[in-house]
């Protein structure tokens, strides 16, 4: 719920899904995440307050969120990993392909990042992962893919030969890191159910995909866009600056401020 400029991070992911034509959204939440449900709920009090004050722009903005889509929530009782978070949606997702968006990876892209994956899915008919080349020294923070050589699927599109979750940098099979977007098929659910917890006690989605790879091809696409990992402090700060500099109402003054910010000191 931390805001980037003036919208909670999670809303960027929701708006990306909506812009890609997705209108049923399932949020997997944990304990104490009621603020998320309230944020996307219809706020009768807020709407009538804004209406009474004639704040029609803000009213339209608020209604845009609550009218956009159907939201449902699933609680992940214990934080047992990303694979487990996907597995708890099994009954509600049912027997259809679905998209997974990890809210802390915020991607500014046009077409929206998840739409770029959906386009590959529509063409190739198998699960698709978003990947990005990352510097070697950062690779062990990600799931990493190895690609099938000699497959020509198009610009930045690969067939996955293997995947490994957070390898030491010496063992990483490439510099192509999985970033938080996936289009998956329902056969991921039995694959995840058959996936053992890793040494940290978590069920990893990467390991579930590795299981699934035994039975069908999986693809990856290098997403065209700018990604921010808002899950760490530096990434969060960079994202705030990036989005603030793209806001017409803030850009000039904020940019002028940044140019002098490191010279400002409080008198002591
Ligand atoms: C998760 C996935 C990892 C992926 C990453 C992208 O890790 O397990 O494979 O590369 O998201 O952000 P986390 O960042 O949750 O540790």
Image (cartoon, rainbow, N blue to C red):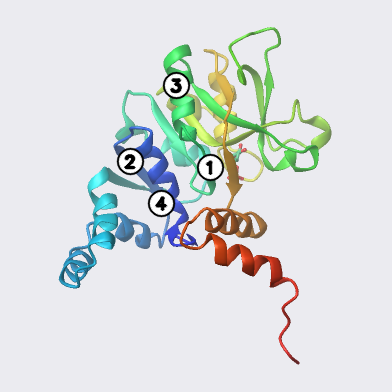
Residue with the mark numbered 2: 25
Q: Find numbered disc 2 in the image and state the secondary structure of the residue it sits on.
A: strand
Kindly indicate whether the residue at mark 1 contacts the one at mark 2 (C-beta within 8 angstroms).
no
Q: Quadrant of the N terminus?
A: bottom left
In the displayed structure, does residue 206 sit left or right of residue 140?
A: left
Q: Is mark 3 within 8 Å of ligand 1?
A: no
N-terminal label among 2 and 3? 2
Is there any visible trace of residue 90 in the rendered image? yes
**Residue located 39% across and 38% down the image:** 17
Residue with the mark numbered 1: 107
N-terminal label among 3 and 4? 4
Figure quadrant, ligand 1: top right
Q: Is mark 2 within 8 Å of ligand 1?
A: no
Query: Image height check: is 228 above or below 23?
Result: below
Q: For mark 2, does the 10 Å Cα neighbourhood hold few (<14), some (14 to 19), or many (20 or more) residues?
A: some
N-terminal label among 3 and 1? 1
N-terminal label among 2 and 1? 2
Kindly indicate whether the residue at mark 3 contacts the one at mark 2 (C-beta within 8 angstroms).
no
Q: For mark 1, does the 10 Å Cα neighbourhood hold few (<14), some (14 to 19), or many (20 or more) residues?
A: many
Residue with the mark numbered 3: 119
3D distance between C-alphas at marks 2 and 3: 19 Å
Query: In this rendering, which labeled residue sits more in front, label 2 or label 1?
Result: 1
């Amino acid at each position: 719920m931390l805001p980037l400029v003036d919208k909670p991070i999670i809303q960027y992911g929701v708006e990306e899904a909506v812009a890609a034509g997705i209108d049923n959204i399932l949020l997997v939440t944990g304990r104490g995440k009621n603020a998320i449900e309230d944020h996307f709920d219809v706020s009768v009090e807020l709407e009538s307050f804004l209406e009474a004050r004639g704040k029609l722009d803000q009213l339209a903005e608020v209604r845009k969120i609550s009218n956009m889509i159907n939201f449902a929530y699933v609680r992940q009782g214990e934080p047992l990993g990303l694979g487990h978070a996907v597995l708890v949606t099994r009954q509600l997702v049912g027997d259809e392909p679905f998209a997974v968006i990890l809210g802390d990876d915020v991607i500014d892209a046009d077409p929206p990042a998840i739409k770029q994956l959906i386009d590959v899915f529509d063409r190739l008919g198998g699960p698709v992962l978003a990947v990005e080349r990352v510097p070697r020294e950062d690779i062990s923070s990600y799931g990493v893919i190895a690609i099938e050589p000699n497959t020509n699927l198009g610009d930045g599109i690969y067939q996955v030969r293997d995947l490994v979750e957070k390898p030491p940098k010496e063992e990483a099979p490439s510099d192509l890191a999985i970033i938080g977007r996936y289009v998956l098929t329902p056969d991921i659910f039995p694959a995840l159910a058959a996936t053992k917890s890793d040494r940290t006690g978590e069920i990893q989605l990467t390991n579930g995909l590795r299981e699934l790879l035994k039975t069908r091809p999986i693809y990856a696409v290098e997403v065209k866009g700018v990604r921010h990992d808002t899950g760490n402090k530096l990434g969060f700060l960079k994202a705030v600056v990036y989005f603030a500099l793209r806001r017409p109402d803030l850009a000039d003054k904020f940019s002028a401020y940044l140019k002098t910010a490191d010279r400002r000191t409080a008198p002591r």
